[in-house]
Image (cartoon, grey):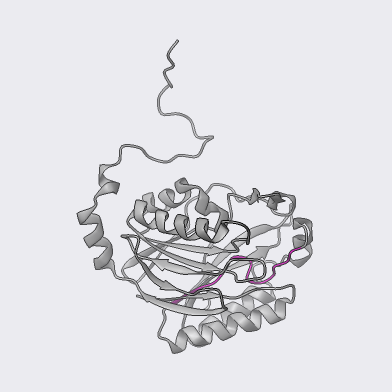
Amino acid sequence: MRIASGQFSAGTDVEANLERVVALLGEAAAGGAELLVLPEMSGYATSAPPSALAAAAQPLDGPFIAGVAAAAAARSVAVVVGTIEENPDGLPFNTLVAISAEGEIVATYRKVHLYDAFGYAESDGITAGEITEPFVLDLGDLRLGAMTCYDLRFPESARRLIDAGANVILLPAMWITGPGKEDAWTTLVRARAIENTAYVVSANQTGPLATGNSIVVDPAGVVVAAAGEAPGLVFADLEGARIEAVRARVPSLANRRFGVVPLDAPASAPVRTTP
């Protein structure tokens, strides 16, 4: 399957952001991609405090996602894109939306791990998603799972997708700039690929707010496409046979002895302590 990863810097002009997304969809179609992965918060991004996000939130049938869906259908390219989803019960959600090549919403994921780190408190403006069934969908002979940005720092998030059958992890992000952040980004993306023997397709926003450097990593940890710092698009061909070959050589998933459960799940057995 040929995929494209698109990176750009979203701003506070939703219509301008939509125009950029539509342009990237056109480039993806011209390059033969079946799927375009776009960054977290592609519809609206700001350096203002998180409390500003509520004013930009839209329902999933609002103009931003509707515009993306229409463009996807017109170009016959599936897309995964980040948006700020309106929440009638409180603060909005940071949501990923998967749209088919026919323009239909086929899956959503509300970010679970909010970015309350490095002096920023995403939870001041965003409601954390509930831990529900993992975002996993089929496309061709691949199974795609998705998570968002800060989820990358929690290996359980990726492993839960793998346990649900994913062999490709999609990672839309707005990985904020700062000392050591770009190195952490590339290290963690490659780590999630290596430990799960799965492809990881990242799509990050670019500067001035985010680090760019969207990369596609294969199941052995090899970077097969890299976008650098500038806005644009990269392509990669994902192969089920490559996943099978790596997993046959490094059967770490088959060898493991621990699973993943949410912290609030009941323990399967009592924990024994030593006096």
Q: Quadrant of residue 238?
A: bottom left
**Number of numbered markers:** 0
Q: Is residue 69 left or right of residue 168?
A: right
Q: Main secondary structure of the magenta part?
A: loop
Q: Quadrant of residue 49?
A: bottom right
Query: Which quarter of the figure is the N terminus placed in?
Result: bottom left
Against 127, residue 260 (above or below) is: above
Residue 213 visible? The answer is yes
Residue 109 visible? The answer is no
Asked if residue 41 is among those painted magenta in the image, a careful observer would answer: yes
Query: Which quarter of the figure is the C terminus placed in?
Result: top left
**Residue toward you, 126 or 107:** 126
Task: Please provide percent x and percent y for residue 115.
Answer: 63, 51
**Residue toward you, 223 or 178:** 178
Residue at the far front in the pictured view: 179
Q: Which span is picked out in magenta?
A: 35-47
Residue at 28%, 47% in the rendered image: 252
Asked if residue 171 is among those painted magenta in the image, a careful observer would answer: no
Residue at 51%, 74% in the rendered image: 228
Task: Please provide percent x and percent y for residue 145.
Answer: 44, 60
**Residue toward you, 36 or 77:** 36
Task: Please provide percent x and percent y for residue 15.
Answer: 71, 80
Q: Is residue 199 left or right of residue 85?
A: left
